[in-house]
Image: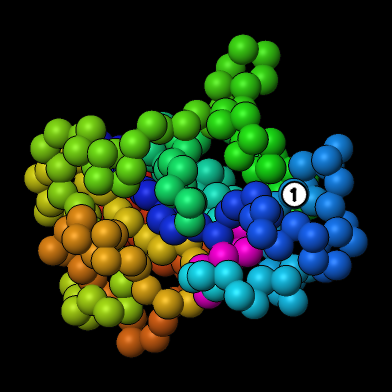
Amino acid sequence: MPLIIILVECGIELIPHEIRNHPAIKRNLSSRIYSSQILDNALHHTAMKNLTDLEKRGRPDIAHLCLLNALGSPLNKTGNLKLYIHTINNKIFKFNPKIRIARNYNRFKGLMGKLLIDNHITIDKAQLISQFNGNVKDLINSFKNKEVFLFSSKGKIVKNYQELFSKNPSENLIVIIGGFQKSHFSDDIFKLSKNIISISNFPLDAWVVINKIITLYEFYNKIQ
């Protein structure tokens, strides 16, 4: 059975209108260059100081690393991964397992800029990234016979979390991982499941968590 991963509250968004006149924004912004339209803390931190949820915003690099790890895995290459990202502004996108995400960060930002403007990425009539119309709860409810797990440092540490993958009878196993730098899931995300799990004594980067989960799932399902 495929593993369903939802990377939530990712810091991917177009530069908000309220800060577009800031010098740090205007320095690089171009209507002709998609990558320049993505909010990036490395470039725009002085303009972002008064934005709400600051700790979760302007970090497209986190999603980039997670996508490279997930889409490059044997799990994905064998058709056993369903991958979604949910942005800080509540847009949800599904990734075709055949998509090749750019290794270059600026090219990735360009792809994300085009995606947020067009709401899809289509090449030669093949839809590589499509939008899901609804929120995360709607997405979860679109799957039947499911079990949902939230991975968070606020969860109870589970030493034998491997058993979630080796013994779970659910048809659809859904894993939710935070795609942000700091802070915790919003209350709306925490309400999605009572299965809140921590797998380390330390806070882990999102791409480390996604790697551990995918590797473990591959091991117990003998995917190489």
Q: Residue at x 44, y 58 (%)?
A: 9
**Whole-percent x, y for residue 70 in the image:** 49, 49
Closer-to-camera residue (85/90): 90
**Residue 186 against residue 36 in the figure, above or below:** below
Residue 182 vs 84, above or below: the answer is below
Seen in the picture, residue 143 relative to 197 is either above or below; the reply is above
Magenta highlight on residue 59: yes
Q: Which residues are magenta?
A: 55-61
Left or right: 43 with respect to 222? right
- Residue 19 percent coordinates (x, y): 71, 62
Residue 32 position by quadrant: top right
Q: Residue at x 50, y 29 (%)?
A: 130
Type of amino acid at the residue the image marks with label 1: Gln
Quadrant where the N terminus is found in the figure: top left
Q: Is residue 39 above or below residue 81?
A: below
Based on the picture, tell me whether residue 150 belongs to the magenta stretch: no
Q: Secondary structure at mark 1?
A: helix
x and y, in percent, of residue 221 in the image:
28, 46
Residue at the image position 41 percent from the left and 63 percent from the top = 178
Query: In the rendered image, is residue 163 in sight?
Result: no
Q: Which residue is mark 1?
A: 37
x 85%, y 67%: residue? 23
**Residue 98 placement: quadrant:** top right
Relative to residue 59, is residue 111 drawn left or right?
right
Q: Quadrant of the C terminus?
A: top left
